[in-house]
Image (cartoon, grey):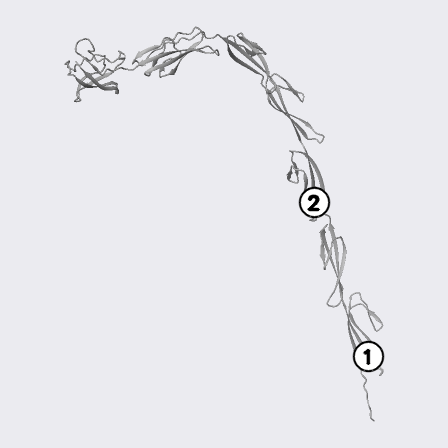
Amino acid sequence: FELVLNVNPTYVILSVVEICNGATYTWHGNNYTTTGIYYDSLLTTAGCDSVFELNLTVNPVYSINESASICDGETYNWHGSNYTTAGTYYDSLQSISGCDSIFELTLNINPVYTIPESATICDGDTYSWLGNNYTIAGVYYDSLLTSAGCDSIFELVLNVNPTYVILSVVEICNGATYTWHGNNYTTTGTYYDSLLTTVGCDSVFELNLTVNSVYSINDTISICSGDSILLGGAYRHFAGVYYDTLISIAGCDSIIITTLTVNSLPVNADAGADQKLSYIFETHLDAIPPTVGVGQWSVVSGTGIISNSYDPNSLVENLSLGPNIFRWTVTNGVCPPVFDETVLFVNNLIIPTGFSPNGDLQNDYFIIDGLTDYSVLAFKVYNKWGIQVFRTENYANNWDGKDNNGKDLPEDYYYYIIKSGNEILYNGYVLIKR
């Protein structure tokens, strides 16, 4: 017997499948949703089983939940997109197994509060707000964080109402009263009062008050007898006290009290007689004292130092050679003066060029005309050889041609010097001819 044995194959057919969680896999008429190994068999045409194996893997699908909070007005960037309003937002990504990963965003928008405030103050006041002081009208801002970390905006609208200063400048006269805001004022000063405006702020009233003086002016005026002067609106001729009223530049009365004196006219002036002086440089003036008024000396020409210019008989010194003219002027108040003049003529010394001391009583002495007892002069005589032959410290016109020893000097020319102190007044030659 011959056996021909044929062995038909039995097939094992493997299927490896992955699905995502939540998906259904249909295999050989059955639905599968969970991970596992599943089998099925079929007869081949040769009547042998063919085994089918399903290796099913169910991959997870991820759901990722997120939440975020932002402040109103901000933007939240999530998965490449910007969000500004509250809500739930989704996005998906594929995992390495090809299944979706679902991202969920819950976005919360926290409010940002704007808190407006307004305030009104008076000019000069200070408004304190959130730790700061404000004095000028305007809109100011500040911010604080809420418990959610968002700003709360505080807005202050500050109004500053004016405070008015109303100045009054007033002048009154001394003795007058000025009534202002219900009070009476009589002295110079600055005064204040205040009233509330309709918005509750002070209006400051300032009074600058000046009290101008009312002057009482005492004056003394003199006129001359026969003259007149306008006082108190009339011409006055007689002595007395007169009153007049004038308005000052400030509009106040000025009382002028004038004492009027009427002076008599000086009658005359008499300076006394002229005087001739022989080399004397001082003398006494000799005016007649006036019956009305006061007399006074003055130098018109020449020289002279007057000891007392109001003394009619004053001593006058330092006269000059020749005429010295002095004026005696008599005045009485505002009346025209009268005057008289006197001449004090000082003669120079006349020195002879020779004399004849021969005892005939004619020209026996060297006589210097003008020399008096008031003239203290030194006198020195020298011969032609320069030898001093005669000297005296107080010459009295008594040189008779003799030397200091009383001997007659021979006829000749002699040189003389006349000195006053250390000053040489005169020098020259004199001839002795017997």
Q: Nearer the viewer, residue 96 or 253?
A: 253
The amino acid type found where label 1 is placed reads: Ser
Q: Nearer the viewer, residue 233 or 143?
A: 233
353 on left or right of 6: left
- Image quadrant where residue 113 sits: top right
Q: Is residue 340 above or below residue 83?
A: above
The residue singled out by tag 1 in the image is 50
Residue beneath the point at 70% across and 39% down: 157
Looking at the figure, which quarter contains the C terminus? top left
How far apart in space, not on screen, are marks 1 and 2 (Cα)?
80 Å
Mark 1 vs mark 2: give the one in front: 2
The residue singled out by tag 2 in the image is 153
The amino acid type found where label 2 is placed reads: Ile
The 10 Å Cα crowd at callout 1, few under 14, some 14 to 19, many 20 or more, is some
Q: Residue 386 has which mark?
A: none
Q: Is residue 310 above or below residue 155?
A: above
Residue beneath the point at 51% across and 12% down: 220
Label 2, secondary structure: give it. Answer: strand
124 on left or right of 397: right
